[in-house]
């Protein structure tokens, strides 16, 4: 099923489970009522930060809005993933594993073009982000400091605060991200 349709179904289900109107969800997520309505109708493919704002407003992991049915063993092929884009085309995220009731983390492969950056809003309370650089180099800017990661380096940080991925090199950076949601 197309990602926009999956998000539409999950958003509607999560909102109605909580007895929230579109107006109420708009207030707690910071996303306009019109945009939420369009997403629920499957009329748009929301950006990463839009999904984060909705997830934070609903107090659910990011990938809860993209949940599908999962088997006991699942192989995810790169060709089966869909690129989600940041506010620009320079940042692409491919979700491999979503958070589920029995898995409290998400796994992403991320690409950040040369000489570009992407800002991410803070995730849910107590969330941690694990980053592993596969190719290139990455600067992670947070409220608590800047961290420079080279190929093969890894970092964990409190992702409930805003953070920005920066690629100052002349090659695309590729990295893995695990978002972990402690109970």
Image (cartoon, rainbow, N blue to C red):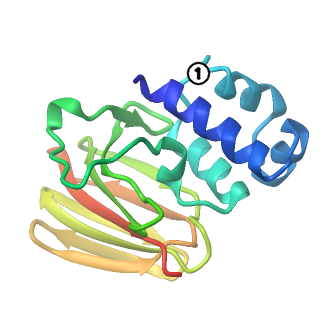
Q: Is residue 68 above or below residue 39?
A: below
Closer to the camera in the image, 133 or 6: 6
Q: Is residue 39 above or below residue 110?
A: above
Question: Looking at the image, which residue is at 35% across and 36% down?
Answer: 90
Quarter of the image with the N terminus is top left
Q: Is residue 57 above or below residue 158?
A: above
Residue named by callout 1 = 44
Determine whether, in the image, residue 49 is placed left or right of residue 165.
right
Question: Looking at the image, which residue is at 62% across and 76% down?
Answer: 125
* Mark 1 nearby-residue class (10 Å; few <14, some 14–19, many ≥20): some
Determine whether, in the image, residue 117 is placed left or right of residue 136.
right
Question: Looking at the image, which residue is at 56% across and 80% down?
Answer: 126
Residue 20 at x, y = what percent? 85, 46
Give the secondary structure at mark 1.
loop
Residue that lies at the very extreme toward the top in this rendered image: 43
Residue 93 at x, y = what percent? 34, 43
Q: Is residue 81 above or below residue 136?
A: above
How many marks the image carries: the answer is 1
Closer to the camera in the image, 62 or 155: 62
């Amino acid at each position: 099923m197309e990602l926009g349709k999956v998000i539409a179904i999950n958003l509607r289900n999560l909102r109605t489970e909580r007895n929230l109107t579109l107006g109420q969800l708009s207030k707690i997520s910071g996303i306009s009522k019109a945009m939420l309505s369009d997403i629920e109708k499957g009329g748009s493919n929301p950006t990463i930060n839009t999904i984060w704002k909705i997830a934070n407003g609903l107090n659910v992991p990011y990938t809860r809005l993209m949940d599908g049915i999962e088997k006991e063993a699942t192989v995810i092929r790169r060709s089966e993933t869909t690129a989600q884009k940041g506010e620009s085309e320079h940042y692409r995220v491919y979700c491999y594993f979503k958070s589920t009731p029995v898995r409290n983390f998400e796994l992403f492969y991320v690409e950040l073009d040369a000489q570009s950056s992407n800002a991410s809003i803070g995730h849910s309370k107590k969330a941690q982000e694990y980053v592993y650089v596969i190719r290139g180099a990455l600067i992670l800017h947070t409220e608590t400091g800047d961290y420079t990661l080279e190929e093969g380096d890894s970092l964990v940080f409190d992702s409930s605060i805003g953070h920005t991925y920066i690629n100052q090199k002349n090659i695309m950076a590729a990295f893995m991200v695990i978002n972990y949601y402690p109970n």
